[in-house]
Amino acid sequence: LVLRGRASDSISAQRFVNNAGTTEYARFQVDSNSNLIVATGNGSTERMRIDSAGRVTMPYQPAFNAIEGNTTGSIIFTQVISNVGNHYSTSTGRFTAPVSGHYLIAFTGGGNSTWGVDVEKNGAKIRRIEVGNPAGFYWSTVCSVIYMVAGDYVNCRAFIGTVSTSAYQGGFSGHLIG
């Protein structure tokens, strides 16, 4: 496949349209900065860009970052820093996978007495972090790559003690890595 534009064009593009040529389904485009752009949905929405240095960005890649959760039981983080696709719920404390794939999931918490948190997938423990009688206030993080099927969810649950998830120090985050 060779993409060529006219001398007067600033871009070259390959468009995929219906038989009548009236509806565009997708577009591959090389812009004037040699960036490859992939667009879908009438060709107007950029889904992926590979810049001339090989860096890939996907503006609709599912991701979330939430802070300020309650301190016992099922932890519901109420302040959302980012939530691409709105797949994290501040009412349930769950991130629900919109598509099947591997997700990087992380939790950070702290406390000055014994505390522990499970990261759960569909209600079952998959990772655990536990801190026993720290000398002073202690922060800890658990991070894991988890395969999720579309519709699976992950959440955090304090199983012992009181855990701090104060703003900008603790939190719950994740994103699709592929």
Image: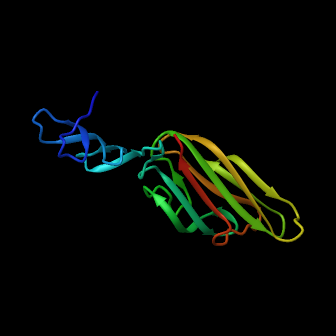
Task: Please state which of residues 9 and 153 is positioned toward the viewer in this rendering.
Answer: 9
Residue 122 shows up from this direction: no
The residue at the point 84 percent across, 68 percent down is 113
Could you tell whether 45 is left or right of 118 in the image?
left
Q: Locate residue 68: give its quadrant.
A: bottom right
Q: Residue furthest left?
A: 20
- Place of residue 69 in the rendered image (x, y in percent of width and height, measured from the top left): 62, 68
- Place of residue 9 in the rendered image (x, y in percent of width and height, measured from the top left): 20, 46
According to the image, what is the colour scheme of the structure? rainbow
Is 105 above or below relative to 131?
above
Q: Locate residue 77: give its quadrant.
A: bottom right
Could you tell whether 116 is left or right of 178 in the image?
right
Task: Please state which of residues 90 and 25 is positioned toward the viewer in this rendering.
Answer: 25
Residue 109 shows up from this direction: yes
Is 35 above or below relative to 108?
above
| The N terminus: image quadrant | top left
The residue at the point 26 percent across, 34 percent down is 3
The residue at the point 25 percent across, 40 percent down is 13
The residue at the point 23 percent across, 40 percent down is 25
Could you tell whether 41 is left or right of 122 in the image?
left
- Place of residue 126 in the rendered image (x, y in percent of width and height, measured from the top left): 68, 45
Could you tell whether 118 is left or right of 44 in the image?
right
Q: Locate residue 157: give its quadrant.
A: bottom right
